Image (cartoon, rainbow, N blue to C red):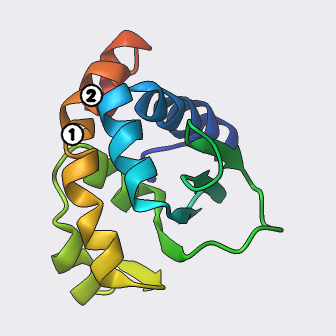
Amino acid sequence: MPVFENSQILESILYNFFLELVQNKSISDKLLAHKVTLRFNYSEPDLSIFIDCKENNQPQVFVNKNDLEPEIDLSMSADTAHKFWLGKVNLVAAITQKKISVKGSIPKLLMLLPAISPAYKMYPEYLKRIERQDLL
């Protein structure tokens, strides 16, 4: 059984988590420095999250915004994403094992890892705060 029961639950959890990430000044400043656009395509259940770190002084997060073309397009199961944000998935290993598919610059993607490293601590705290300890 998937971690997330349906797309609405996945959206309510991950979209709001991404909003918290980009509101963290340390993370957002580092993301903006890379001037990149990313799309995370999740399956089981389906959801797409687009992050624009190019145009504004704050990264922008959109749900199911498929009319924009990202520089880096990632596809994975929602379960893999959940494990990634918990710090239980190594990005390079997941790409090699085809658990995460990447279209675009993998080196540029890897350069973002230091920017998002605080998220591995933030995600479990976020799940506890929204009373979803059952996902830990």
Picture coordinates of residue 89 (x, y %)? Answer: 19, 61
The image quarter in which residue 94 lies: bottom left
Question: Could you tell me which quadrant the C terminus lies in?
Answer: top left
Q: Which mark is residue 120?
A: 1
Instruction: Inspect the image, locate mark 2, and give the three-letter code of the amino acid beneath it.
Output: Met
Q: Is residue 39 above or below residue 126?
A: below
Could you tell me if residue 6 is visible in this image? Answer: no
Q: Is residue 124 left or right of residue 77?
A: left
Vertically, is 8 above or below 25?
below
| Residue at (83% x, 68% y) in the render | 67
Q: Is residue 129 left or right of residue 9?
A: left
Q: State the CA–CA distance, disc 2 to disc 1.
A: 6 Å
Label 2–label 1 contact, CB within 8 A: yes
Position in image of residue 60 (x %, y %): 63, 42
The amino acid at mark 1 is: Tyr
Residue closest to the eye, 18 or 85: 18
- Badge 1 element: helix
Q: Residues within 10 Å of mark 2 (few under 14, many from 20)?
A: some
Which residue is depicted at the point 25% across and 71% down?
110
Residue on which the image places disc 2: 122
Q: Is residue 29 visible?
A: yes
In the image, residue 66 sits, relative to residue 116, either above or below, namely below
Circle 2: element type: helix
